[in-house]
Every structure is written in C-alpha cells, then in structure tokens.
Amino acid sequence: MITVQITQAKFDALVDFTYNEGAHAFEISTLQKTINAEQPVSEHLFTEWDLAGQPPTYSQGLYDRRVAEYNLFSGGD
C-alpha cells in the first residue's frame, strides 16, 4: 500500500501498526495517504488509533503502542 521509498524503521513501524489495526484500516487511513503523498507525518496520525472495545473507548495501552510506533517511524528508535 506504500508507493514511495521508506526506510526499514518506517517499514517496521507500519508493519506493527497494520498487524494491530488491520490491513483495511491502514489502507483507508490518513496515515497511509500522507506517507504516499510524501507529506510530513505527525504523531497524531498514529495516536488517533487509540480506541478499543464495543463501544469503542480510549485505551492507554493502544495510545502507548501508537506513540512507540511513531517514535520508530520518525526516528528509528
């Protein structure tokens, strides 16, 4: 789904995100569209995916996971 060149760290972060959220969610995400448009990726594009359960409610665990993915994506750590 990514049509531009990305680093291994970015790829790894996106694999983790997609494994957790699902391929369809990533396919329709603003995150994917922003990357393919070669625009700057903000932390919010990751952390907006922090809901779980029925009805969906905020999950601190998911928020923390998204921050970790963003940090890997943006800095390779």
Image (tube, grey):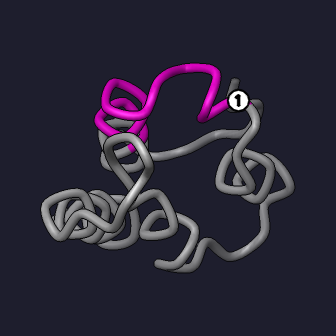
**Element at badge 1?**
helix
Q: Return the residue nearer the eye: 25 or 41.
A: 25
Badge 1: few (under 14), some or many (20 or more) residues near its Cα, within 10 Å?
some
The image quadrant that residue 21 belongs to is top left
Residue behind mark 1: 27
The chief SS type of the magenta part is helix
Q: Please state if 5 lies on the left or on the right of 67 as rendered.
A: right
Is 23 a magenta residue?
yes
Total numbered badges shown on the rendered structure = 1
Amino acid on which disc 1 is placed:
Glu
In the picture, which quadrant includes the C terminus? bottom left
In the rendered image, residue 76, in percent from the top left (x then y), is placed at 25, 62
Q: Please state if 25 lies on the left or on the right of 76 as rendered.
A: right
Q: Return the residue nearer the eye: 9 or 20.
A: 20
Q: Please state if 63 lies on the left or on the right of 43 as rendered.
A: left
Vertical side of 74 occupied by 12: above or below: above
Q: Return the residue nearer the eye: 41 or 66.
A: 66
Is 15 a magenta residue?
yes
Q: Which residue is depicted at the point 41% across and 49% down?
A: 10
Vertical side of 37 occupied by 74: above or below: below
Q: Return the residue nearer the eye: 61 or 27.
A: 61
In the rendered image, residue 63, in percent from the top left (x then y), is placed at 27, 68
In the rendered image, residue 34, in percent from the top left (x then y), is placed at 76, 59
Vertical side of 49 occupied by 9: above or below: above
Q: Which residue is depicted at the point 51% across and 68% down?
A: 48
The image quadrant that residue 62 belongs to is bottom left
Q: Which residue is depicted at the point 74% across and 55% down?
A: 30
In the picture, which quadrant includes the N terminus? top right
In the rendered image, residue 16, in percent from the top left (x then y), is placed at 29, 35
Q: Residue furthest right?
A: 37
Q: Which residue is depicted at the point 31% across and 32% down?
A: 20
Residue range highlighted in magenta:
14-27
